[in-house]
Amino acid sequence: MSASLVRATVRAVSKRKLLSTRAALTLTPSAVNKIKQLLKDKPEHVGVKVGVRTRGCNGLSYTLEYTKTKGDSDEEVIQDGVRVFIEKKAQLTLLGTEMDYVEEKLSSEFVFNNPNIKGTCGCGESFNI
């Protein structure tokens, strides 16, 4: 894992309904705890920044980076003492998304449960329909 990037996966959530909230992004307790843990070792950083990049077969993938400041066009989400900044390009894509942190036997990663995504391709990237 790179010092400035964290791995993330996108999942389509058609089986359960997420409630809309005022925040562009909501964090699960697991995600909050993991971000706090990651930032504990990086006192010069104030939070994490979520962005999107064009990748994969059909669409977008999310990026996570440590950040020292809020960008001029970033949306700021503060939850349970954790600050997450959303790049302008990612704001509409992430609207209503839940950010979770999942630990399994062979992997651990942030997962974005996005009600706006209709599916994912074999490489794990998302596509909007």
Image (cartoon, rainbow, N blue to C red):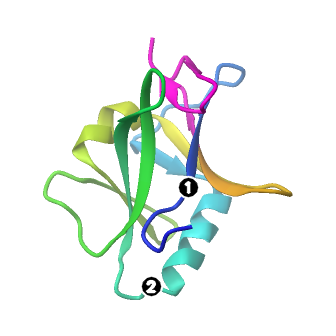
What label does residue 42 carry, if any? 2
Q: Is residue 77 left or right of residue 122?
A: left
Which residue in the structure is indicated by mark 1?
Answer: 7
On screen, 84 above or below 34?
above
Mark sitting on residue 93: none
Q: Is residue 69 left or right of residue 97?
A: left
SS label for mark 2: loop
* Residue lying at 64% horizontally and 25% vertically, measured from the top left: 122
Q: Residue at x 50, y 69 (%)?
A: 2
Viewer-side residue, 86 vs 4: 4
Q: Is residue 33 left or right of residue 97?
A: right
Q: Judge by depth and name the residue closer to the eye, 38 or 125.
A: 125
Which percent across, then down, holds residue 64?
43, 57
| Secondary structure under the numbered disc 1 in the rendered image | loop
For the point 44% across and 18% down, the residue is 128
- The Cα–Cα distance between marks 1 and 2, rounded to whole angstroms, is 18 Å
Q: Which portion, as a residue range, is magenta?
A: 112-129
Sort mark 2 into few (<14), some (14-19) or many (20+) by Cα contacts within 10 Å: some
Q: Quadrant of the N terminus?
A: bottom right
Among numbered discs 1 and 2, the one appearing first in the sequence: 1
Q: Position of residue 125 (x, y in %)?
A: 53, 32
Q: Amino acid at mark 2?
A: Lys
Q: Give percent across and percent down for residue 95.
A: 40, 34
Point out the image quarter for the C terminus: top left
Magenta residues: mostly which secondary structure? loop
Query: Disc 1 vs disc 2: Cβ atoms closer than 8 Å?
Result: no
